[in-house]
Amino acid sequence: MTWDEPFKLMIVDDESERLAQHLAEALEPAGFKTTIVRDVAAAQQVLAREPVDFLVLSFNGQGALNLQPLQSWLSSLTQTRTVALLSESLESYEDLLHQAGVGLIIPRRLNPRQIAQTLINQGELRNLEEQNHRLRQMVDTRTAYENLLGGSAPMRAMYRLLDQIARTDAPVLITGEDGTERVDVARAIHQKSERAQQPLVAIDCRKMAEDRTGAAVFGPLGNGSYSTGPSLRHSAFARAGKGAIVLHNIETMPPEVQRRLVDFFHRPFFQNETPGSPQPLARIMATAGPNLLGKVEAGEFQRELFYRLNILQVRVPPLRERREDIPMLAQHFLRAAARRLGVRATVGGLTFSSKVLLRLFQYDWPENLEELERTVAEMATHAQDGQLEVENLPPALQQLDESANGESIKLNGKSTIPLKEAKRLFETEYFTGLLRRTHGNMAMASRYSHVGRPYLYKKIREYGIEPEEFR
């Protein structure tokens, strides 16, 4: 097996250079880049300049081993996996070597090919561990999920829940305040599910005030013993096929339509169908405001329908509970507005000043994402090319008290925000300026900042920065 990036391996052997050479030759086809040194002192000099992935210490001498200086040295090699080749006369030192920091002990009596295969297996194990670590990081630090944006703790928790819900076909109730991305959450669930290739039909129940029969969902009433079911031709179910139907703002659904939906749950078939030959049906998802249960208790929404829909529930967090997502979302909305206006965002075009980002962060956004998107679009429309300043903000945000935010720190000696958010704002500006300076060249940005490229990519994804915008 070979790897895209070869493993660097060092062999320290003061007696059997022939064994070390055989090992190097056996490991080379598997993608190992091997260095051979004669003693620990030489190894320390080389490793001070260039770390390795694996360090192989060959012990073939007689008498006692002095492990104290070895333990001190090995403890400093945090990114290196240490292996010992041990002769039979020294096998009693196995436990002490493990305590000193040696991860694996291989008997020297094995032939070079067997020793090499053990090292190759260790390489495969390390590769798997690194892949698992990267996957865990992706899950735990996701800043997007299908069409959803945000890397805050509430959003990451919601993403994990959506992963589970997408694997089922049960009804879903998605609750949240006005302006939160409730329909987008339903769409994300659909796109992650096995129904993703089928249509998704969304119906806003607020438009059903005059639709007392539920024709928008079920089509016209039919004839026969089951006339309330969905029409096989003229219904949302017919359009959705095996896909999904989203009933948006279901708390506004007229009572007559609620009853028709309850009937459907009792007999989930198209009109004139029999249970023996049913057509495939779409999955049902519904969105509602945060007080749907209160409407149930007040008798304004059918209790049975509530429990039929509430098999699985997702709560979409309001923007004030996920403030750390605001810089990323604002940059995203600014790029979208700039594209509509035919200008560029962040490079020779529109960008946010730090004071504007601070006000956007501090505001509570009662209308949530819809209000943030509308605000950014209005600012972009009325601004000239260049940096968006406080005077470009709506009056409510211009007058915002910069010092109101509880436990906080000073930013630039003037503004007051929580430490975590100050760091986020600073890093957003820092990485934006860095990519502007390097014209989006990630290799050059990595050199200038002394930050490794994997970490640099992680940070710009986290803050919604796109290198292409700077090229």
Image (cartoon, rainbow, N blue to C red):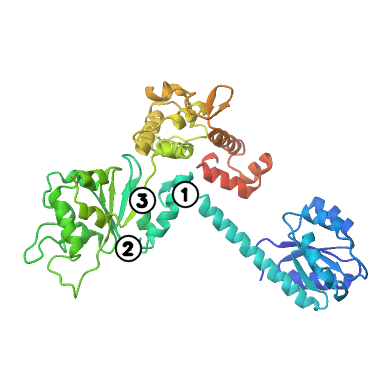
Image height check: is 313 above or below 86? Answer: above
Q: How far apart are marks 2 and 1 (CA)?
A: 22 Å
Query: Residue furthest toward the right?
Result: 63
Q: Which amino acid is tagged 1?
A: Arg
Percent of width and height locating residue 288 = 28, 46
> Which badge, 1 or 3, comes first in the chain's sequence?
1
Q: Which amino acid is tagged 2?
A: Asp
The residue located at (44%, 26%) in the rendering is 384
Q: How many C-alpha atoms fall within 10 Å of the one at disc 3: few (<14), some, or many (≥20)? A: some
Looking at this view, is 92 or 402 the one in front? Answer: 92
Q: Are marks 2 and 3 in contact (CB under 8 Å)?
A: no
300 to the left or right of 323: left
Residue position marked by numbered label 1 in the rendering: 156
**Helix, strand, or loop for circle 1?**
helix
Query: Residue furthest toward the front?
Result: 297
**Helix, strand, or loop for circle 2?**
loop
Looking at this view, is 401 or 461 the one in front? Answer: 401
**Marker disc for residue 314:** 3
Q: Can residue 295 be seen in this view?
A: yes
Looking at this view, is 403 or 43 the one in front? Answer: 403
Percent of width and height locating residue 45 = 86, 53
Q: In which quarter of the image is the C terminus?
A: top right
> Could you say which quadrant of the image residue 265 lies in?
bottom left
The residue located at (76%, 58%) in the rendering is 52
**Helix, strand, or loop for circle 3?**
strand
Image height check: is 176 above or below 90? Answer: above
> Which badge, 2 or 3, comes first in the chain's sequence?
2
Residue position marked by numbered label 2 in the rendering: 169
Q: Distance between the residues labelled 1 and 3?
A: 13 Å
Q: Are marks 2 and 1 in contact (CB under 8 Å)?
A: no
